[in-house]
Each structure stands twice: as C-alpha cells, then as structure tokens.
Amino acid sequence: MSNPKILLVGPLNKEGVGGRLEEMKVWAKLFAQQEFEVCVYTPNFSGKYFGKIDCLEALDLILGFKKSVPKTLKAFILRIWYSRIFKFKRDSFYQSNSWKKFAEGFSHLFLFITDDSKERRIFESNLPNRVMIRYTGTLNSYSKILKDNQFISPEKRAYIFHSTDLIPGLVSNCPQYFIDQSCLQEERLKLIPLTKSVKRFAMVGLFMPVKQIEPVVKLFSQLPDLTLFLFGQGELESHFKDIIAKEKIQNVQIKGFVSPDNIETIYSQFDVLILNSLHETGPMIGIEAMAAGKLILSRPIGSMRKRLTGFDEFIFTNQEELLFQIKKIKALSEDRILDYSSRLRERYLKEYSLNSISEQIISLIHKS
C-alpha cells in the first residue's frame, strides 16, 4: 500500500476550544508521527490549531488560496461567503466539484461528527475513499445507521465509537471499532503529584446547560469547608456569577478559560473532578484527570463507567448521591486517597496512553 493520505474533517468553533478539537489534534499528531500525509478540513473556522499540519476551510477550496491572500481581503470575502446569499452554496458544498476533487486526493477520511452534522453527507456520498465516522456526540437514535445498512458499502465505510456503552443493542452492516481518548499533554500531567487529600473540587469545560454545573454550584453551598473551581467559559458564565453573588456562596470560584497548551495548570489546582453532564461521548477531561492522578466523581455517561470499572464508589446518578459521595470521599485517609490516585493514573498509562491509543488508531489504516 502506498503512503496513506489522511484527511480529518470536523466542524470547529471560532474560539478554538472543545473536546472535538482536542481529539482531532491527538489523531493528527499520531498520524503525522507515522509520516503519513495529513490534512485537516473544517467548514468554517480554520486556524493554526494543528502546528505544521494544514487546516483548511471551504473557501480555501473554492477560491484556491491559502497564505497568499492578505488577511484583510480574506476577512472581507469570508463575510460575503457567510452571508445569507450563499447559504445554499454552503449547505450543498459536499456535493460540489470543489469538494469532490479535493476529497478524492486522500485515501482515508475521518469524520469527527455526530449524525446531525452536515458532514455526514460525506459518509453517505459515493466517494471511493475509505470514510469513517468518529462519533463525537451521543446517538439519540440509530435511524441513520439503520438506513446506512440499506446502501452503504461496508468495505469503504466504518464507525468508530469511544465505548460499547454508547451503542447498546446496535446492529449494523458496517464495521464498528472502539477506540477511547488520550491526551497530548500526558507527560506534563504525569508530573503532577498524586492526590493525597480531598479539599478542592473542579468542573472543567464549556459552560453549557448539558454540563449541569448550576446544581453542583448550589450543592457546594452545603459544603462550606470545601472549594469548587469552575474552569472554562461559555454562555452561562454570567448566570453562574449571579447565583454565586445572590446566594452568597463563598466557596465557589470561576477560574475562567485556560489554554489546553497549559492544561497542567488546571489539574494542579484541584483534587477531585466532578462530571455531572447529562451526556458525553468521552469526555476528554475524564482522561486528562486520570493522567493527572485526580479522583473523579462522575455520572455513568459516555465512556466513564468503563474507565471507572472497579471504582464503583465514584459513580453517582443524582445530586443526593453526589453529596453523599463527596462527604464520603472527604473522610478517606491519606493512604486511601493516594491509592485511588495511583490506580487511576496506572489505568491511564496502561489503557489510554498516547502509545496505547496510537496503536489502535494506526491499526485502522492497516485494516483498510
């Protein structure tokens, strides 16, 4: 087989944050380390997120430019491109000749999407390439996968999930692969001292309703001798500030956004990560916390139940259980806390390290 040419595709936000971006960065780096030709495509907000690996967007393909066009001219063209006038052209881009000519230059396409993403049309198209969906969101329905069974070629298409827990009862004709997450900053996270005491808790990520941060903020008003840090940014930040001020909650602090490049500065500031989301696919922060040797209290979401196998006392299903477990974990001896911390890091190193995940990802190319 000739040297693989890999295209990673996924919609990114203009802020350059989120689990999808961090996961795409991991995959891009691992493919590049194999000396494969790698390129990243995002429909809207391309940027220097991937180091020396090119990150292109729709307009780069349509107009055939990259660095040669002045930034001011490109910004002007982009405003026109994203206006209502070109909505149909944007929506139908994956059926265009510009896209087809570009995409056919790659042997493998990996789509970091959900079933609601427009990029799913690439998977459903007649491209001759090997195309795989790396699901970055939970499946609310199997309807599109069941529809795939009727016309998708299993030799050219496949699904990649984080865990079998995300697809109970699914039967499909296309191959299914299960690959969890890893983190680029593992070496720095591994240098963080193991947790020995439980006083500082944290929630990390975008401030969105699905993360269910507000109930935890209110819960900590009952735990004045403990501290909760909120790391991140998003639409609910001002709302959280209002709640903290109105209810005079003194032990909750909004720490703001920290660049993933400095992620160790987040995990060195707390002892226990709380995951209270309604649903997740990973999440990436769970893997990062394991690498950092942090204790984790989590709902049974995404891959967390599998990751915390043997740590059932860290799984909760409602606020009452969370409160009970916080009080229970707070009372643990230093030796017990250190043992939990050590075991969680050891599990990361054994099952989720970059080396372990790299072998699984690269094997996808050889299975083609």
Image (cartoon, rainbow, N blue to C red):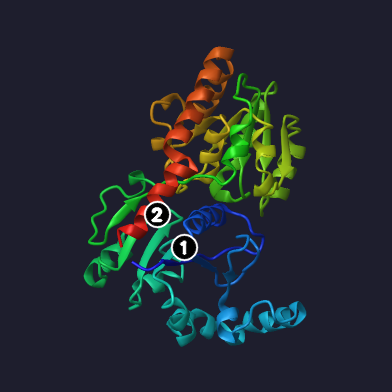
- Residue type indicated by callout 1: Phe
- Give the camera-side residue of 223 and 227: 227
| Residue 317 can be seen in this image | no
Residue 230 sits in which quadrant? top right
Q: Which tag, 2 or 1, sits closer to the chain's start?
A: 1
x and y percentages locating residue 133 in the rendered image: 39, 62
As drawn, is 267 to the left or to the right of 24? right
x and y percentages locating residue 348 in the rendered image: 47, 35
The count of marks equals 2
Q: Which residue is label 1 attached to?
A: 36
Q: Name the residue located 51 percent from the left edge and 65 percent from the top edge.
A: 10
- Give the camera-side residue of 158 and 353: 353
Q: Which residue is label 2 attached to?
A: 362
Please determine whether, in this image, residue 290 is positioned above or below residue 171: above
| Residue 183 can be seen in this image | yes
Residue 362 sits in which quadrant? bottom left
Please determine whether, in this image, residue 228 is positioned above or below residue 233: above
Please determine whether, in this image, residue 27 is positioned above or below residue 329: below
On-image quarter of the C terminus: bottom left
- Residue type indicated by callout 2: Ile
On-image quarter of the N terminus: bottom left
Q: Name the residue located 73 percent from the left edge and 41 percent from the top edge.
A: 255
